[in-house]
Image (tube, rainbow, N blue to C red):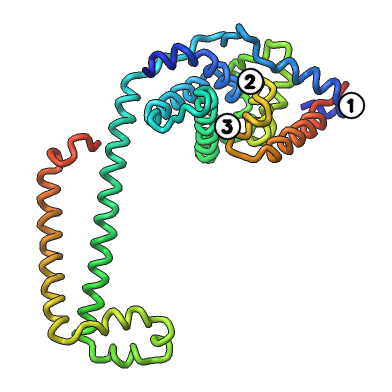
Amino acid sequence: MLDELIRQYGRRLYGLCIKLCGSPYDADDLYQETWLRVHCHLDQYHESQPFEHWLTAICVNCWRDLRRRERWVSLLVPFSTNEEKDRTLASVPAQDNAAENAEIWDAVRRLPEKYSTVVILHYYRGYDVRELSRILKIPEGTVKYRLHQARELLKGGLRDE
Amino acid sequence: MNKKGHAISDERLDALLATLREEEDEAPQTKPPVINPFRLEMESVRRESRRQARWLTAAVILFVTLTLFMTATAVRLFSPRLEWVLQSPQAQRYMVYGRMLIGIYGHRMAVVTLAALMLLLLGHILCGALMVKYRDRLFPNHL
């Protein structure tokens, strides 16, 4: 059962994981974690909603959990200076850097989590406001507000030369 | 982000956001990792452990409640000053439920209750010792 689902939805899910995390290393973790949760809670899935929506909701929740955990871990990471941390991070190759739209992806990932989530799911995945409302379990008005706020932040952040 | 220049227009932002759209045949540059079957098994074991931990927590809460109850009964039996405490205005106000609870027992009844609770405590200790001794059989999946 799980193998079949992985075969059917795995590649798209992995694409979303990469877009959410921005690095293939974190994406691997997120991908594994998402399928683990699916495996554990498959009995809770109702066929009233598309499986992909349920899967996306799990993936987004896992991503939030991983980020929350990372925030705590970052307090304990032994970097003595910010320069040292930046050098270490810069040495990791970023997959999207070569891409034409790297700048916009970079800007999206710098948004606060609640805004970047709706932007990625709306503009990358193509979910409409109603679908986003169901996936994220927030009112449609909140989705619209977050999309609007995200656009304003992006406009302020991305400046013309 | 580049802080030079002026904020981009809506049209430019729309154009940039349109480039984010996932293509129908888009595939990640790297293959998704294979799900590790060991992790799946570990997750099942962890869930089982969590279930056992819930029972253990319930048992601890019950044990603590009984201990508090027993202490209250002991205080009722062996401290004549408690009457004075219970009749003070503060106790009237804040300890009315505790007072009602302790007040239910007469002297003889309290002795019986205390004895029963002591037996219960001994039973707890005995059960605990047995559980520790046979823990591998009781919780085969516990890590």
Query: Which chain is mark 3 on?
Result: A
The numbered disc on residue B5 is 1
Q: Residue at x 57, y 16 (%)?
A: A15
Residue at which label 3 appears = A135
Q: Amino acid at mark 2?
A: Arg
Of the 4 image quadrants, the one containing the N terminus of chain A is top left
Which residue occupies the extreme top position in the image?
A: B25
Q: Residue furthest front?
A: A48
A92 over B24 or under it: above or below: below
Question: Is there any visible trace of residue A106 in the rendered image?
Answer: yes
Disc 1, SS: loop
Are the residues under badges 1 and 2 in a single subunit?
Answer: no
Q: How far across and how far down the image is residue A20, in percent?
A: 59, 25
Q: Are marks 3 and 1 on the same chain?
A: no
Q: Determine the secondary structure under disc 3.
A: helix
Q: Is residue B16 left or right of residue B116?
A: right
Q: CA distance from mark 1 to mark 2?
A: 31 Å
Instruction: Give the label, 1 or 2, closer to the camera.
Output: 2
- The amino acid type found where label 3 is placed reads Ile
Q: Is residue B29 left or right of residue B69?
A: right
Question: What label sits on residue A125 in the rendered view?
Answer: 2
Q: CA distance from mark 2 to mark 3?
A: 12 Å
Residue A49 horizontal/vertical position (percent): 52, 28
Contact, mark 3 vs mark 1 (Cβ under 8 Å): no
Mark 2 or 3, which is nearer the eye? Answer: 3
* Local crowd size for mark 3, using a 10 Å CA cut-off: few (<14), some (14–19), many (≥20): many
Which residue does the image show at 49% across and 16% down from the upper left? A9
